[in-house]
Image (tube, rainbow, N blue to C red):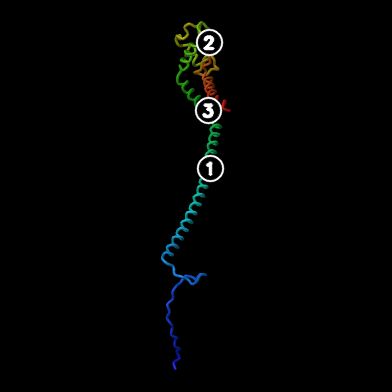
Amino acid sequence: MSSVLSRPALERRAFVLRPPATAEGSGAFLTDEDLLRVREEAANCAEQRVRSDFEAWGRGLEERTESAAGDLLQAARGLRDARAKFLEDAADEVVLLAFAVARRVLRREVEADPEVALPLVRELLQRAAAGTHVTVRLSPRDHAVLSAADALPESAGLDGVHFRLDAAITSGGVLVETAAGGLDGRIETQLELIEEALRAPRAAAA
């Protein structure tokens, strides 16, 4: 007797996959039309899901974009207001600096030209009324130059023109005195008038 047990013979059977049984009866095979319909339904469901997700994403993106645009607009307004305030606060300092530079330039020009006061004296004499006595006050340097010069044609018709030395007047400046009033041609006075004209719009706006 052999010590090896023989295996029982296996019966070969064919297995067929069927859909699960329903309440109406046993399962039935899916036809090609059924498969096509299932595929179309699945595709439609997937398309609707993708469309819904995309629309939700688009709404969220639009909301975030509007929020970011609002933040940027607010930041831009803040920068504009800060810039305007900075320029307003700095305006006085800029004007002072500009006039300091202008004074230095004028002083350099006056020192380089000994006859710089002569055109101004002529202009002021032309403004004086005929028949009046005129006194022209000048700096020591300009007084020496004008006293040595020939008679000015602009003094014709006046009741005399006298040049007076005035140490309080800086070179290049002129102060004309008449019975009807004075004509101030000093450099400092002209700069003050220009400075007041520049400050006037800001004062009116305030």
Pick the quarter of the image with the N terminus.
bottom left
Q: Which residue is mark 3?
A: 95
* Label 1 environment density (alpha carbons within 10 Å; few <14, some 14–19, many ≥20): few
Mark 2–mark 3 distance (CA, rounded to whole Å) = 34 Å
Mark 3–mark 1 distance (CA, rounded to whole Å) = 37 Å
Mark 2 belongs to which amino acid?
Thr
Q: Which label's residue is closer to the chain start, 3 or 1?
A: 1
112 shown above or below 3: above
* Label 3 environment density (alpha carbons within 10 Å; few <14, some 14–19, many ≥20): some
Q: Nearer the viewer, mark 2 or mark 3?
A: 3
Q: Nearer the viewer, mark 3 or mark 1?
A: 1
Residue 135: numbered disc: 2
Residue 166 seen in the current view: yes
Mark 1 belongs to which amino acid?
Gly
Q: Which residue is mark 1?
A: 70
Q: Position of residue 58 (x, y in %)?
A: 49, 50
Task: Decide which of 34, 158 is in the foreground and name it.
Answer: 34
Labelled pair 3, 1 in contact (Cβ < 8 Å): no
Residue 139 seen in the current view: no
Q: Nearer the viewer, mark 2 or mark 1?
A: 1
Image side of residue 36 versus residue 193, left or right:
left
